[in-house]
Image: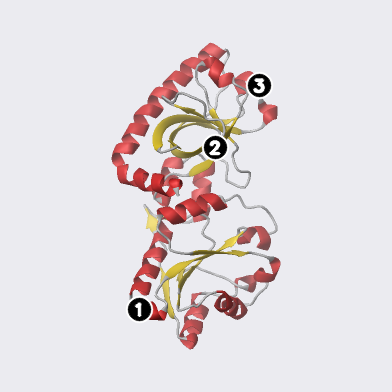
Amino acid sequence: MILILGAFDGFHLGHRRLLETAGAMAGRLSAKNAGDWGVVTFSPHPGNVVKGREIPVLFTEPERDVLARFLHIPRTLKIPFTPEIAGMSPADFLDYLEELLPVTGIVVGKDFRFGRNREGDTSFLRKRSEAKGWLFEEAEPLSIDGEKVGSSSIRSHVAHGSVALAKRLLGYPFFFEGTVVPGDGRGTRLGFPTANVHYPTEKVMPRRGVYCVSVFVGTLWMPGALNVGVNPTFRQEERGVRAETHIIGYNGSLYGKNIAVFFEEFLRDEEKFDSPEQLVSKMKEDVLLSGRLFGEAAREGNDLYERLGKALRG
């Protein structure tokens, strides 16, 4: 089996090179020689164990499963990343992999490091693979407009509200999914009912403000306007940051239903208005702009959203 090694906090365009390389390598092997491939990743993120602090992730475990289906990854092995795993020498870790899977090849990015104190690198992997009779390939990093595509930079873009740029680097929009739970009903009273989904605490939190989003509800894509914030007009800072989505044109209850919310564009910062009437007037503008931007995104990426919908349906 050809193994792609990495933390894989989501799968960005740079990772696609690894997937394509592994698929091509497996295609050169016969079924008799275990010519399949898959991803070996870790849970939790290795940085949480090595650095001893929580590192916000781009995607939760269930969301990464959606992305694996979206990208047609045949197999995914999630290794529990423990202090014992972190303390393994590079050689011991490869021996450990051999106990788990019938390894026939390794694919990694050029800057991949592993093992105790990050002692293992691509040079070590190449030599070890030759000794074991494995195929080995390292992929060059990908840069777009002079920026190296990496999970850490994408997390930073999301945290600063640059979700359109994050989409370019990921190859799909940043998103979250979950079950709709009851809110305080204020949006409904204002004429803009919102779907309230618990935003996973382990995910990177986007910059506070209003976003155009694409929402997958049941089997349909619908436009939405999402507010990330504390609703300062009504002085609800004590409740903490929420992500509340008004799904444009949707009628009916969503309580208990699962939805996925995809960030398309940052529209504006969160504001405190002097009156509910001023807020409603601004929300009308947000909804009109979100509807137009959703239409543009759908026209430009029809195939993308069809594939994402299929992956979300499982």
Q: In this view, does 73 lie above or below 213?
A: below
- Does label 2 or label 3 sit earlier along the sequence? 2
Label tally: 3
Q: Where is residue 162 in the image (x, y as percent from the top left)?
A: 46, 41
Q: In this view, does 278 lie above or below 264?
A: above
- Does label 2 or label 1 sit earlier along the sequence? 1
Closer to the camera, 226 or 33? Answer: 33
Q: Position of residue 127 (x, y in %)?
A: 49, 84
Q: Is residue 75 visible?
A: yes
Query: In the visual, does 87 lie left or right of 18?
Result: right
Q: Do the residues labelled 2 and 3 touch (CB within 8 Å)?
A: no
Q: Which amino acid does label 1 sit on?
A: Ser
Residue at the location (35% across, 78% down)? Answer: 30
Mark-to-mark CA distance, 3 and 1: 64 Å
Tell me the element at label 1: loop
Mark-to-mark CA distance, 2 and 1: 49 Å
> Mark 3 sits on what residue?
235
Query: In the visual, does 214 lie left or right of 28?
Result: right
Quadrant in the rendering for residue 120: bottom right
Q: What residue type is labelled 3?
A: Arg
> Mark 1 sits on what residue?
30
Residue at the location (44% across, 46% down)? Answer: 313
Tell me the element at label 2: loop
> Mark 2 sits on what residue?
207
Q: Is residue 80 above or below residue 299?
A: below
Which image quarter is the N terminus in?
Answer: bottom left
Closer to the camera, 145 or 165? Answer: 165
Q: Which amino acid does label 2 sit on?
A: Arg
Q: Do the residues labelled 2 and 1 touch (CB within 8 Å)?
A: no
Q: How crowded is mark 3: few (under 14 residues within 10 Å), some or many (20 or more)?
A: few
Q: In this view, does 273 lie above or below 217?
A: above
